[in-house]
Amino acid sequence: MNFAFSAILIIIILLPGAAVLSAYYGSFQSKQSTREIPLVDLLIKGLLWSIFLHTSAICLLSFFKYEVSFDLIYAILTGQPIRISNAQATHAFRTFTTYTGLLIISVWVIVKFCKRIIYNNKFDINYYSLRITNYWYHIFSARYLEGRGVPGTLIMTDFLFLDVYVDTQMIYSGFLTDFNYSPKNDMLENIVLSNATIRKFEHYSVRNQIAGDVLVIPMANIKNINIYYIKVKDNED
């Protein structure tokens, strides 16, 4: 049997486990995603999930008196000679792909639903193994404040003020407007400040306003970041 075809079948079989990891740790917003996981790593890391999901799905289908035949798939993977008609092969392939497709869609929806419950109840903040977003989004979104033993709350934060110490021994200060995170490299790329000022490290009181609307600072130049979570009081400018 063609080795490439067998490899494709193995990938299809492992896809449900990969879907679990992708649905939980991935996001359409790159600023929220954890590190981008290549497909090969997803398939390998999702191996146990795939075994569990296929076992559960087969048991559930058996309960409803419905069976999915894996005889043809097993014969292909083990290299056994196959003697069936085209009609039988087409039926077996259609049944297997339908089963796999429905399993992947079901798993994706269930994981996304569970992820929303975990997010809304802040379980991902207090339990590191359930972390949904990357570290920098965790900090810059102020959800970090919802953790146990951390002073302050997310609802009491209107904006972030940063002191950024760079490699030229200068400190840039300003309000956090945006930041860029690379899921592929698992690293913060830059931060964007508005109303930015600059001062020397040794002179705290001497601040010079920086012309322009926003200031972009590459992470490669940053040595330290000091963050203030600020709440604007009512009836105050």
Image (cartoon, rainbow, N blue to C red):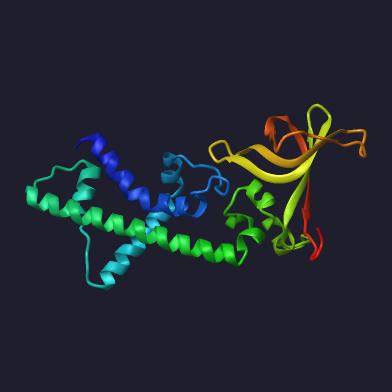
Image point 77% across, 54% down: which residue? 229
Q: In what quadrant of the picture does the C terminus appear?
A: bottom right
Residue 43 location (% of width, % of height): 41, 45
User: Is residue 219 in sight in this rendering?
Assistant: yes
Residue 197 location (% of width, % of height): 81, 37
The residue sitting at the top extreme is 168
The residue sitting at the bottom extreme is 64
Rendered position, 110 above or below 141 = below
Taking 86 as reference, is 78 left or right?
Answer: right
Q: Nearer the viewer, residue 120 or 52?
A: 120
Rendered position, 137 above or below 213 = below
Taking 12 as reference, is 139 left or right?
Answer: right
Residue 3 location (% of width, % of height): 25, 35
Taking 85 as reference, is 201 left or right?
Answer: right
Question: How many callouts does the rendering have?
Answer: 0
User: Is residue 225 in sight in this rendering?
Assistant: no
Picture quarter containing residue 2? top left
Q: Nearer the viewer, residue 130 or 14?
A: 130
Residue 101 location (% of width, % of height): 29, 55
Q: Nearer the viewer, residue 22 or 73?
A: 22
Image point 8% across, 51% down: which residue? 87
Image point 65% across, 59% down: which residue? 125
Q: In what quadrant of the picture does the N terminus appear?
A: top left
